[in-house]
Amino acid sequence: PGARGLSSSLEAHGNGTMVTPLVKHKIVKKRTAKFKRFQSDRKVTVKESWRKPRGIDGRFRRKFKGLPPHPNVGYGSNKKTKHLLPNGFYKFVVHNVADLDLLMMHNRKYCAEVAHNVSTLNRKAIVERAQQLNVNVINKSAKLRSEEDE
């Protein structure tokens, strides 16, 4: 196991290869299904997004047997894997090249995501700088124009 770990860390620091997270935790979700609003399947005017039931006689609020579960604190994620992306990194939204410098020492824990309102020209500069700093950018191919369009 020692030799395998050494080779993967050498690959991460070489140029042209992708960065790997420092530790890769297994993400376990207690529930993947959405909590739907009660009777959203019956009435068109009642949307699916969760609302707390507040009726005085409502059987759903009173948690009668055979009714869907309510969201509560027990469904929360593990502290170690909360906000963790499937690739093993935490997301950091980058708006300019200066924001990337914050990730210089944390490139094995955080990956960059270029903000949605950044121009194509600035995106290219951010992606280029990220490559120099060995920072993983999760949406590096977004909003890139091909050569035929120009």
Image (cartoon, helix red, strand yellow):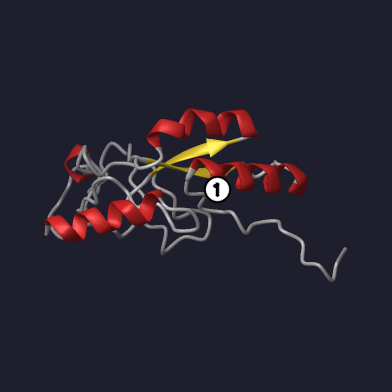
Quadrant of the image for the N terminus? bottom left
Evaluate whether residue 36 shows in this view: no
Of the pair 141 and 125, the residue shown nearer to us: 125
Residue 96's place in the image compared with 67, above or below, is above
Residue at position x 49%, y 28% in the image: 102
* Number of other residues with Cα within 10 Å of mark 1, as a class: few under 14, some 14 to 19, many 20 or more: some
Of the pair 85 and 55, the residue shown nearer to us: 85
User: What amino acid type is highlighted by mark number 1?
Assistant: Gln
Left or right position of 40 against 100: left
Q: Quadrant of residue 142?
A: bottom right
Q: Quadrant of residue 56?
A: top left
Left or right position of 77 against 42: left
Residue at position x 16%, y 42% in the image: 74
Q: Secondary structure at mark 1?
A: helix
Evaluate whether residue 6 shows in this view: yes
Quadrant of the image for the C terminus? bottom right
Q: How far across and down, in percent of the image, does residue 70 sit?
A: 24, 47
Q: How far across and down, in percent of the image, does residue 116 sit?
A: 65, 45
Q: Quadrant of residue 126?
A: top right
Of the pair 13 and 47, the residue shown nearer to us: 13
The residue singled out by tag 1 in the image is 131
